[in-house]
Image (cartoon, rainbow, N blue to C red):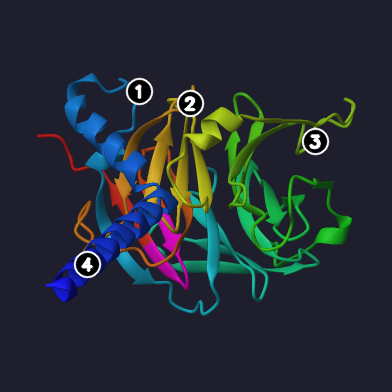
Amino acid sequence: MRDIFTLKRLMLALAALLLVLLGLVAQEFRLFERAWFNLQQWQQADQLDPNSLRLGDYEVEIEAKVIAGLDDDVSALTYDPDRNSLFTVTNQKAQLIELSLDGELLRRIDLHGFGDAEAVEYISKGLYVITDERRQRLIKVQIDDDTRELHADVKQQLSLSLGSTGNKGFEGLAYDAAGQRLFVAKERDPMRIFEIHGFPHRDPDQPFAVHVLDDQQRDAGLFVRDLSSLQFDERSGHLLALSDESRLVLELNTQGKPISSLSLLRGRNGLTQSVPQGEGIAMDHQGVLYLVSEPNLFYRFSKPAQP
């Protein structure tokens, strides 16, 4: 009889330990907050922000297409409305890569002295910003049809010291053209989104003044484990945040509150397989979403045509 009681106590102790471990895992992956958000979305489906992109309505139309001719890991993505094409970067063999909207490789531009190039963002015609993740540098570059290489040492740069460096630094960029704000995502430890005014500096007749803002309350409300990429939607003023580890894209309204999401898990939004490692997201003027995943996979999402 004593052995039975001892076994029961052991089983109860193991069950309690398992519950504690499950709770810790759920907390680490922000599962409780994510489940609460999904429940609210379901309950308030008819009360969404009228400006919301409604990311849950998107369906994949190009899935896990291998970018032919590209072997290096891709990181980040931006849409160029003037060229009607996309740009990404590779950081092992540092290059700026131009892609078609179908994920075809159009051009390679060699990057010299850019360190760990991790993100690229379109600013205006021919003007971009590229990040050096480890050294927390933002580098202004200009390209045209004939550009085949870029040298960082002759470009306008902004070096920032915002928390620890290493490979958890500047991971994503987004630009608000109307507000002239550059959003910079720090991957994690801590996960942050900074808002930079005054860079890139485009008017030589004006003083070079940079202001860096952040919103810790907003960042604390992001129920994702990391930040891989950002995208600003000029029409709504909303910001999209891509998380590789959470396999999720969040839409943040103008107050920084999550209002819709796009799951990158198998079986969701038409995906037959989960996106392995989402690293870059971009949106064109038609609202079509483009995504790249390491090592060299291309995705395109759009909303089904309304009947």
Dot placed on the residue nearer the N-terminal end, 4 or 2: 4
Residues drawn in magenta: 291-298
Category of crowding for the residue at label 2, using alpha-carbon neighbours closer than 10 angstroms: few (below 14), some (14–19), many (at least 20): some
Category of crowding for the residue at label 3, using alpha-carbon neighbours closer than 10 angstroms: few (below 14), some (14–19), many (at least 20): some
* Mark closer to the observer (1, 3): 1
Q: Residue furthest front?
A: 2
Q: Are marks 1 and 3 in contact (CB under 8 Å)?
A: no
Dot placed on the residue nearer the N-terminal end, 1 or 4: 4
Q: Are marks 3 and 4 in contact (CB under 8 Å)?
A: no
Dot placed on the residue nearer the N-terminal end, 3 or 4: 4
Residue 237 badge: 2
Q: Which type of secondary structure does the marked residue at label 1 adopt?
A: loop
Q: Where does the image place residue 97, in percent across and percent down from the top left?
A: 58, 65
Dot placed on the residue nearer the N-terminal end, 1 or 3: 1
Spatial CA distance of label 1 from label 4 is 52 Å
Q: Which type of secondary structure does the marked residue at label 3 adopt?
A: loop
Spatial CA distance of label 3 from label 2 is 22 Å
Horizontal side of 143 relative to 81 (left or right) equals right
Compared to residue 187, the image places residue 117 above or below, namely below
Whether residue 229 is in magenta: the answer is no
* Mark closer to the observer (1, 4): 4
Residue at the (28%, 41%) spot, across then down: 35
Q: Main secondary structure of the magenta part?
A: strand
Residue at the (29%, 36%) spot, across then down: 36
Q: For mark 1, what is the residue? A: 51
Spatial CA distance of label 2 from label 1 is 9 Å
Q: Are marks 2 and 1 in contact (CB under 8 Å)?
A: yes
